[in-house]
Image: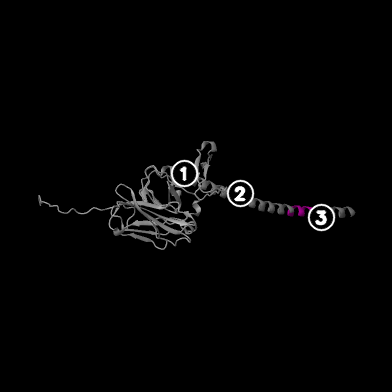
Amino acid sequence: MKNKSKLSTINYKLSTSLGFTVIEMLASIFAMAIIFALLTAVFVQLLNIQRRAFNMQHAQENSIFILEAIAKEIRVSQINTSFIVKNAGNIDMVSTGTQITVNDEIMVYQSYDEETGLLTVKRGALDTVPQNHLAGSILYFADDFITVDPTEYVTSEIINVKALTTTPSGILGIDDVDMQQVEIKARAIRPYPPANVKINGKYWPAYFENDLVISWVNRNRLQQTGGEIIGYFEPGVTLEASVNCQLILTEFDENNIEIITQNTNVTAVNTFTLLASSMNPNTRKIKFVLKTIRDGFECLYPFEHSVLVSNLTAPTGVNFEVIEI
């Protein structure tokens, strides 16, 4: 009887020990499942980050390819907002509103027709004015990557810089890049020049007759850097506070010798008229400069243009003979 009692007690203890082992095993499996799920989520997130980084690098590489190929056939006048380009590459990677720099002008990408090769842009954006561009001009497409040099420079200081090309395959060695000189011009704090300038209702005319009428619209540095970038030919906005607009007119004779120069503050208006009767009778050409000034800083790219005086008159005292009708 005593032996049976001991055996029964031993069996009971073994059963209880086995029950705790199963619970612990289930808890361990559940914990491992949670850890595996967390690790999987982290891995997926890392893959997404790597994929986005690769896409950005791929877009940047495509932009480099585009800027090298797109301008090979370009020849653009100051008033063209659409022009044909060839070998544009993967230009569909470029987003609407992307800034394009060509020579000293900034454009804004609007659209591209793959069938016709027609590129449409906004001209003379930010503080620039439209320019003529010859075939072979290079278009540089900006991206969203920005870096800042913390070093402080003074205006007119010349610094040496190197730009390193970066692609998914690597970064160009600094010793393989030519050094370029850049002049510090305090561009960020300078006011923007007037835009949409017309002479007697026309853009950049070669001649004019009778009165000389100049019209323009205002641009605002703070609005442009904090809102949508508008093009040169678009309507005006409120002039930036403390900005003055100045018009300089210079008359030249037939030998290109200066006759007279007048400087007028035209901040409060958007048009100026020079009457033909007030011009010097020997004037054959008029050059005018339209610029803005704020706190002693002038706009980086003032509007400058020269126009010839058309003084052609119908001949008098001439007899005409009709030969045949």
Q: Which x, y percent locates residue 5?
A: 87, 55
User: Which of marks 2 and 3 precedes in the sequence?
Assistant: 3
Q: Residues within 10 Å of mark 3 (few under 14, many from 20)?
A: few
Q: Which of the 4 image quarters holds residue 69?
A: top left
Q: Name the residue under label 1.
A: 64
Is residue 291 shown to the viewer in this render?
Answer: yes
Q: What residue type is labelled 3?
A: Tyr
Q: Are marks 1 and 3 in contact (CB under 8 Å)?
A: no
Q: Name the residue under label 3.
A: 12
In the image, is residue 44 above or below residue 240?
above
Amino acid type, callout 1:
Ile
Left or right: 286, with 161 as reference point:
left
Looking at the image, residue 262 lies above or below residue 182? below
Seen from the viewer's position, the closer of residues 39 and 24 is: 39
Q: How many marks?
A: 3
Marked residue nearer the N-terminal end (1 or 3): 3
Q: Which of marks 2 and 1 is in front?
A: 1
Residue sitting at x 77%, y 54%: 20
Q: In front of the other: label 1 or label 3?
A: 1
Observer able to see residue 123: no
Three-letter code for the amino acid on which mark 2 is drawn: Phe
> Residue at the location (45% across, 46% down)?
140
